[in-house]
Image: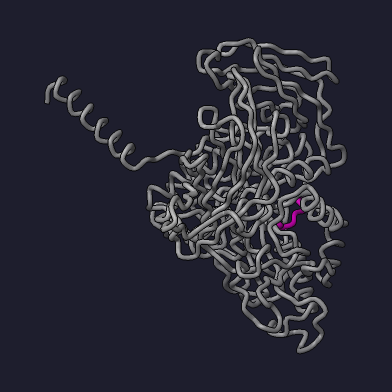
Amino acid sequence: MSEKKEITLLYKWIGMILSMLLVADITYAQTAMINVASRKAISLNGEWNVILDPTGIGEWRQIWLENKAKSKTDFVEYSFEGSPTLKVPGDFNSQMPELTYFEGVVWYKKEFSCTPVKNKRLFIHFGAVNYLATVYLNGKKIGSHEGGFTPFQFEITEGVRSGINALVVKVDNKRLQNGLPGLGYDWLNYGGITRDVNLIQTATTYIEDYSIQLIKGSRKEVKGWIKLNGVNREQTVKIQIPELGLAYSAKSDRMGLAKLHFTGAFKLWSLENPKRYRVSVESETDSINDEIGFRNVEVAGSRVLLNGKVVFLKGINIHEENPYKGARAFSKEDAILLLNQAKALCCNMVRLVHYPHNEHIINEAEKMGLMVWSELPVYQHIEFSDTAVVSKMDLMLKEMIRRDRNRCTVVIWSLSNETYDGTPNRTKALATLTQVCRQLDSTRLITHVTNSQSYNNNSFKVVDSLYKYADIISINEYIGWYMPWQGKPENVSWKMAFPGKPVFISEFGGEALFGNVSGAADEAASWREEYQQQIYINQLKMFNNIPNLCGVAPWLLFDYRSLGRMHPVYQKGYNRKGLLSEKGEKKLAWYTMEQYYKRK
């Protein structure tokens, strides 16, 4: 084929693709700007009118147009006027009894007043919406976003009008076979606009993103960048840390990217002294402030080091749920409630499962001196052979890292949980994702959590192809609950496929109903606290034999809501593996784990 024919064919293909996109009317959300707290923002939180749409007919009725009857013979079979309201942020399941277990479509509407300002840009920023969000402004679709736990935004500079504006959001939390997570998972599928919504005003060219962290292995050297968004992207940018008397300037290129490289006499963020510095980021057209800590986390042989010192990761698993309310956690108060209990257990790390949690818990953990493990919702039964799934993983990874890359409290990115070696394209897809993660952020550790190890003759054989790509081998095991002990716990032996790497027990435990004293204490079916406590006693004996053990995390802090837990007497819709009940009552296993951590 001649070069001319190849070019002609290429243009035909490009034309076909563009035509398909135009016909499909595909508009996607923009990856969100970071550090919303430092922006000029108007909160759109509060009461939103809602229309429940269990049959999904609202799309056909074009609810976003808010049609009105124009003549005496007209009628319209929907209305936001007179409709119930829901609080935003918040899940819809805990706010209306009829929505307790609902998975489907709810339409939200919020009116806001706006006066557009010349030479200023406006954005609608969502902290998170679970799971699919389609957004309309003044009757016109402005875009959509998939993923229930990461932020997104839309620019509305051209679509907003002076005076009252109507924002309508179609929220759909139905499970998708090619969603992340997929169809089956062990937590309540809280739907709704679950995190903050803000109207943000910026300059025509604004600071969109930045990376300011120590390079791995250094305690004084920062390599990073600032990214400008707008028409005038070639500017002088400045970083200032007044407490250190530090000022650094650079020039951004035509793409708005300015590279940073400087040193400072930092007091490092640590568990004992969670030091953070006030940092100002400035361009010629914009400025924002941040509180940033500096620390170094790395693996040296079989050990994890924080600021060059060996640290044993004393973890606890936490779901994003306020146990006392039985609702999705979203606020600073929720975060403090959960983290205070982790501190009371003598933890130094929280594993935030199985999806990125809200920014409040990240910020509060950083202030408290708690390390954070943040995780993607790549959870069991994912269809890695579906190219759409692979694209979604890539986008969610980038959104997760982008939001929290400057939060020194985050020390581990977990890219998957309980996936299986034999799943088509699984290892290839996750190996590629790991490579992307390292390119985006080289300052943190990466892990993949597995539960595919074999246990025979009181011996564990830990083999998984993903461990080749991980910094830490992370294992979920439930000896004593889902499988019985095959011998004395202190005699369990371990064989690792990658014997030189640190090993982390990321889940273990069993269920018990707080206060339950009926039934045999040595039978799992009794659901007694004593049985759960004995699991912990035995597990702690076994830990002494695990080679290269760098940390553990019980499953989990509080009992939490899960539709798959159907025992009418003991579970009642709750996973009862918590060390605390949903009312905050301490089970016997709490004290066993607390003493272990105190000794560590």
Of helix, strand and loop, which mostly describes the magenta segment? strand
Indicate yes or no whether the magenta region holds residue 228.
no
Q: Is residue 463 visible?
A: no
Spot occupied by residue 554 in the image (x, y as percentages of width and height): 72, 62
Image position of 65 with respect to 459: above or below: above
Q: Residue at x 55, y 17 (%)?
A: 256
Start and end of the magenta stretch? 312-318
Q: Residue at x 82, y 71 (%)?
A: 587
Spot occupied by residue 109 in the image (x, y as percentages of width and height): 58, 49
Pick the quarter of the image with the C terminus.
Answer: bottom right
Closest to the observer, 434 or 284:
284
Spot occupied by residue 331 in the image (x, y as percentages of width and height): 75, 49
Spot occupied by residue 111 in the image (x, y as percentages of width and height): 62, 43
Q: Is residue 436 visible?
A: yes
Indicate yes or no whether the magenta region holds residue 313.
yes
Pick the quarter of the image with the N terminus.
Answer: top left
The answer to whether 377 appears left or right of 574 in the picture is left
Q: What is the basis of the colouring in this image?
A: one colour
Q: Residue at x 14, y 24 (%)?
A: 5
In the picture as drawn, the residue positioned furthest to the left comes out as 1
